[in-house]
Image (tube, rainbow, N blue to C red):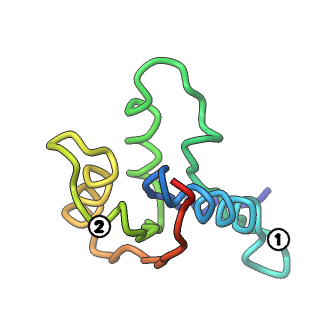
Amino acid sequence: MSDEWRIFLSYRREDGLHIAEWLHRRLNGTALRDDRSVRLRTYYDRAAPSAGDFRTILRPYLKSSKAFVFVATPLASQRRSSTDFLFDELDWWTTKRRTPPIVIESFRRTNQ
């Protein structure tokens, strides 16, 4: 039986999707030990169930994650509104956890 270490991926879809997708493909299911007893499990919203209010799925996964990966892109640098999901996730993590977020910087330009 293997253990699971959850990682929460937080990103702005408009310019961070390519990095989040790449991280999910590379990390999800990866064994952390040679005996494969611990595997990484990423929360990636595009792979999560989409029924109903997704916060009911998102919040428990955020609470049970061992790490928070924030994809820092130009469009992720500012809060858009008082209900900006990206900043809600980041705010929750930084106020509820002692472990700082892991920040992945991406300055790739989009074709928009």
- State the count of labels: 2
Left or right relative to 76: residue 107: right
- Residue at image position (49%, 50%) is 13
The spot of residue 55 in percent (x, y) is 38, 33
Amino acid carrying mark 1 in the image? Arg
Q: Where is residue 83? Give x, y as percent.
A: 21, 39
Local SS, label 1 = loop
In the image, residue 82 above or below residue 67: above
The residue lying furthest to the right in this view is 35
Neighbours of disc 1 within 10 Å: few (<14), some (14-19), many (20+)? few
Q: Which residue is mark 2?
A: 77
Give the vertical position of 10 relative to 50 (above or below): below
Question: For residue 2, what is the image quadrant?
Answer: bottom right
Q: Nearer the viewer, residue 4 or 7?
A: 7
How would you rate the neighbour count of disc 2 (Cα within 10 Å): few for under 14, some for 14-19, many for 20 or more?
A: few
Extreme left residue here? 82
Residue 17 falls in image quadrant: bottom right
As rendered, which of 44 and 7 lies closer to the eye? 44
The quadrant in which the N terminus is found is bottom right
Front-most of residues 80 and 43 = 80
Find residue 108 and report its horizontal and vertical position in percent: 54, 73
Q: Residue at x 72, y 65 (%)?
A: 39
Location of mark 1 (residue): 36
